Amino acid sequence: MRYDMSKTEAQIMDILWSIDRKASPKEILAFFNKGEKGWARQTLNTILTRLESKGLIKKERNSIEPLYSKLEYRQLKGQEIIDDMYEGKLSNFLSALTGQDKISHEEEEELNQLINRLKKGE
């Protein structure tokens, strides 16, 4: 599944994540009508439908809720990037990130601690 979002879709998700509960379309529309956008309800419905088709929200008659927390979304998006660009290997990502230069002893220790925590499932 692709987890790409437009800027506007991301704004809607940020609203949902910030209120940390189901929201009504009316609440989201009020947020956008405070600014310069002046959205119609149909515009919001179109964007909500796109988010729902991407599997990011659950939309019911008068409530919308995210299917993932912000952290879960970032993890999914991060894994998608590693899968698409780095053959699904974290080592390829880290090599690209560092330019295959040497890493400092401190960075090595931090990575080792992270790896050990992940092995233990902490």
Image: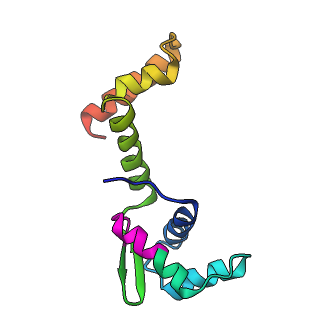
Q: Position of residue 119 (x, y in %)?
A: 26, 31
Residue in view at x 43 percent, y 19 percent? 95
Q: How is the image coloured?
A: rainbow
Quadrant including the C terminus: top left
In the image, is residue 49 part of the stretch drawn in magenta? yes
Query: Magenta segment range?
Result: 47-57
Q: Position of residue 54 (x, y in %)?
A: 36, 63
In the image, is residue 100 part of the stretch drawn in magenta? no
Left or right? Give the position of 39 relative to 55.
right
Q: Main secondary structure of the magenta part?
A: helix
Residue in view at x 44 percent, y 54 percent? 4
Left or right? Give the position of 97 relative to 53.
right
Residue situated furthest top in the rendering: 102
Q: Position of residue 105 (x, y in %)?
A: 50, 12
Q: Position of residue 45 (x, y in %)?
A: 47, 81
Q: Indicate the quadrant where residue 90 lies.
A: top left
Q: Indicate the quadrant where residue 120 lies.
A: top left
Q: Is residue 29 above or below residue 11?
A: below
Residue situated furthest right in the rendering: 36
Of residues 5 and 62, the one drawn nearer to the viewer in this rendering: 5
Q: Is residue 97 above or below residue 31?
A: above
Residue in view at x 44 percent, y 50 percent? 74
